[in-house]
Amino acid sequence: MIKKLLGALALSLTCTVSIAAESGHPLETAPDRLNDMASLQNGAKLFVNYCLSCHSANSMRYNKLTEIGLSDDEIKKNLLFTGDKVGDLMRIAMTPDDAKKWFGTAPPDLSVIARAKSINLGPTGVDYIYTFLRSYYRDTTKLSGWDNLVFPNVAMPNVLWQRQGERSLNRVTTHQVANEDGTTSWERVTAKYDPQGYSEVKTEKLENYRGDPSVRAVLESSNPAAAFDNDVADLSNFLGWMAEPVQLKRKQMGVWVLLFLALFLVVSWRLNSVYWKDVK
Amino acid sequence: MAGEKTVETTGLLGWIDRRFPLTTLFKEHMSEYYAPKNFNFWYFFGSLALLVLVIQIVTGIFLVMNYKPDAKLAFDSVEYIMREVPWGWLIRYMHSTGASMFFVVVYLHMLRGLFYGSYRKPRELVWIFGVAIFLCLMAEAFMGYLLPWGQMSYWGAQVIVNLFAAIPFIGPDLAIWIRGDYVVSDATLNRFFAFHVIAVPLVLIGLVVAHIIALHEVGSNNPDGVEIKAGPKDAKGHPVDGIPFHPYYSVHDIMGVAGFLIIFAAIVFFAPEMGGYFLEFNNFIPADSMKTPPHIAPVWYFTPFYSMLRATTSDFTWILSAGAVIAAAALFLKGNLKGVMRVAVPVILIVVAVLFKVIDAKFWGVVVMGGAVVILFFLPWLDHSPVKSIRYRPTWHKYLYAVFIVNFLILGYLGTQAPSDVFNIMSQIGTVIYLAFFLVMPVWSRLGTFKPVPERITFHPH
């Protein structure tokens, strides 16, 4: 019976398909640098400089950064700009009401964003942020002048654009359209966005197309992407750490707890055997 | 001395025993409670459920010391516990993992009862108290889930409370009465907090005590489903197929506890979110009454029942209606009801069949979901098989149980997924299988060739 149960469980788990993101754009796997203090520190620096003016991290204290190897003095000298104290929470001056007026929506608090963006049995929130921050392209038709493949119509502009350099996008969309006479037909839309965000869109009708709707988007960068990708990896890594600062300690401790419990199991097993030895 | 009882114990214990039946209680429930020798793996889950209850209460007490039941502060106070309260993260993960593991353990405990007929005479009340515990546990988990005040907390509560609005006539007012507001709000959070930390736990503990007292009154069942009290007895009148619970099963259960804690700690320390099933990722977004998440799914332990709720569409009520008509015809023609009942019961069923199509399907969804749990109360009277244990049932009964289990797991899986046409049909089939398993049990449970039940339990010395 147990075997049947486990079999059914395994079956139901393998049936689970994870969906990449709301947009269907596939998420890339971010490099795992959770144990890399230099990466976390670089991420913290980028976070404080680029994110922490519109986004708050209300659950995070500046001096929590001592856990990733920074001293109070280093935090004060390099990461505190607004007269905050080192024991303060990472709050921002912008009110949600102002934010709504300026951006159309209040930027979310980023304390636990890396956990919020994770997908069941799928890519983590760190993967999401890593892909999201590298998927911006210029689009003059949008209010901010930017759009994003992972998060279409995002209100946030590409704040890291100076680090990234010029970008252009080629996107081929194949989808079904309804005709006036009620029938449907397939069409392919090829859109090219140049680095200034002006687009050139070409639509062609497909005869006898058999297949599924699809979107294929390719971003091209003028700069070599390695340095930028590295920074974004560090920033995503930091956001992943910040979502649960205790996670490193938790796993280290877990090893000892499991070792102790394994010993406890052996002792209790032997104790049980001694008692039951004479039961006939 | 006048008024003092004579007891065997001396010293401090004697002093207590003359005033409180401590030794008597210990003997009655531990050292002289005779349990069958042949308990197997499935018999760990009762003591494990008790362990998880203790974990939940103790960690809960510490969480309440730092949690703020206030719509403005609740979400941040949970993160405060996770980051600033010394060991707060451990306490919180133990509590969140404990919630899910409680259901794992209780589902397995109930399945054990199903396998070995532990609900059959004379253990009906043990089972009924147990199902009441399961209901309380569901209420406890549902209200506790609102407290972190994340998006899933909020919208999950919104969806479930709205179900009550489907009840004819009183529904909408009832839903407002439960929430204390027109939407889930601070008032709802406060009352759910009160229920979660004091009202429901009090009832839960009372029921657990009743469950154990009832069990010790009638004695434990065992994998063979034969009564050890009916077997031979030793010189002192104790059943020879039984063994004192303490020390034999206390040391045995400690071993179970050790094994369980290894799994428990592995989750707490290495996978507290359990891939998004124990802690839902959407719940790391603070509750926002203006933003409905695209996909609202309850936590995994509710999903089988949630599937049955979603399966009950207006098309599906035709099937329920047809089921009621068939049942009415079968009871009238073949049933062994006597006198007025022979006509009354089928007539009631025909009325129900009509009501299935008259009242909104949403209401019947709630009835099906609630009924799927309530039907468990009647299990002792639905099962008419001549043997208790699955060991001596016809082989095809075992396949029926396997279908039931796999079906329950599939319903659980479907409940976690966004609805689609195929999934909807699957969950409708699943709902029919689940309900038919119990409702047709009086018929199928007596069919087939049963194996001879031994006089005594089968026990192989360790």
Image (tube, rainbow, N blue to C red):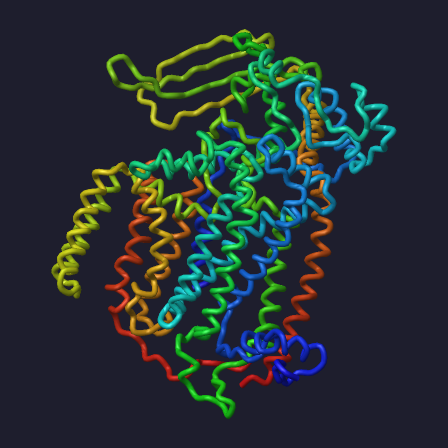
Whether residue A126 appears in this view of the structure is no
Q: Residue at x 64, y 13 (%)?
A: A166
Name the side, left or right, on which B406 lies relative to B351: right
Q: Is residue A119 above or below residue B57?
A: above
Q: Residue at x 77, y 35 (%)?
A: A64
The quadrant in which residue B72 appears is top right
Q: Residue lying furthest front in this view?
A: B2
What count of labels does the image hold? 0
Pick the quarter of the image with the N terminus of chain A: bottom left
Q: Residue at x 51, y 47 (%)?
A: B141
Residue A35 screen position, x and y as percent: 74, 40
Name the side, left or right, on which A87 lies relative to B410: right
Residue A8 screen position, x and y as percent: 43, 54
Residue A132 screen position, x and y as percent: 59, 25
The quadrant in which residue A229 appears is top right
Front-lying residue, B316 or B350? B350
Residue B26 screen position, x and y as percent: 59, 75
Name the side, left or right, on which B427 lies relative to A198: left
Whether residue B52 appears in this view of the structure is yes
Q: Residue lying furthest bottom in this view?
A: B235
Front-lying residue, A265 or A183? A265
Q: Residue at x 81, y 20 (%)?
A: A83
Q: Is residue B161 above or below residue B332?
A: above
Q: Is residue A186 above or below residue B453?
A: above
The quadrant in which residue B30 appears is bottom right
